[in-house]
Image: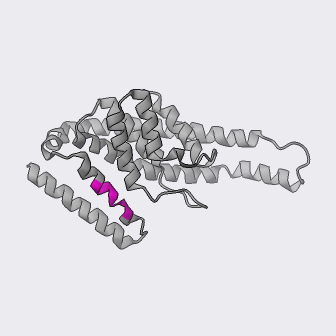
Amino acid sequence: MVCADWFFFALFSLFRFSLSIGLLERPLFIGLLWALATGDYDICLKIAIFFELAWLDIIPAGTYIPPHLGAAMFTALALTSLYGLTDTGQIALAMTAGIPMAWLGTRLEAKLRIGQGKCHAMAQQWAERLGSGPFPERIIYLSMLRSFATSWLFFFVSLVILDLLLRMLLGVLGPLLDQMNVDWPHLWLAASLGGLLALRVRRAYAVFFSGAALVGLALIIKAL
């Protein structure tokens, strides 16, 4: 299943802009799909709830490119399945590894939009000829194929790097995480503070991340 996640990630990347299918890109749907494929409903849906709460206000609209929720979800699910993680603290580490992927995925999509200018120019040339001749559908197919292939390669390389990183972190922090007694209600409560980030105010961001850092530091000191 973990090998197939590259395909599913690339496929769901198309759902963001190439194929508009509403809320099927949301973490809850992705978590349910992964649970149906693996049979691990408990952990998959708990991870989905965490990311859903964290990015409850993120809805694609207009020219705004939101964080790539699919990248974060698939990374967390893939790493959790790859290592067979069941401890909440260790799963939290896998989810933490997936969060930067949301922002990297957004940067990738911004680059793709710039790189697809040639396809846009071809479509514009056809429109300027007042639609003489059939519309060249290959422009759309080429654009979608480029997005799919680029997303697949991006996720494959990123997952290989994160796999090596998580393996080292589990070896170093694994015993410490076991002693911290982190449970899912703690993670969901922290994720629900994502509504604070919806304010789009830098001070709110500063308060959120400072508070998270202090709580994390307190838990580490307590475990030591």
**What percent of the width, then of the height, locates residue 162?**
35, 39
Determine if residue 137 is in view: yes
**What percent of the width, then of the height, locates residue 149?**
58, 36
Please give left or right for residue 69 compared with residue 133 in the image. Answer: left
Residue at 43 percent across and 69 percent down: it is: 200
Give the vertical position of 42 relative to 93 (above or below): above
Residue at 33 percent across and 57 percent down: it is: 192
Residue at 40 percent across and 72 percent down: it is: 201
Give the number of marks: 0
**What percent of the width, then of the height, locates residue 223?**
10, 49
Residue at 60 percent across and 45 percent down: it is: 21
Residue 212: say if magenta.
no
In which quadrant is the N terminus drawn? top left
Please give left or right for residue 158 compared with residue 64 in the image. Answer: left
Q: Which residues are magenta?
A: 189-195
Give the vertical position of 200 relative to 80 (above or below): below
Give the vertical position of 72 relative to 87 (above or below): below
**What percent of the width, then of the height, locates residue 159?**
40, 37
Residue placed most toward the observer, 184 or 80: 184
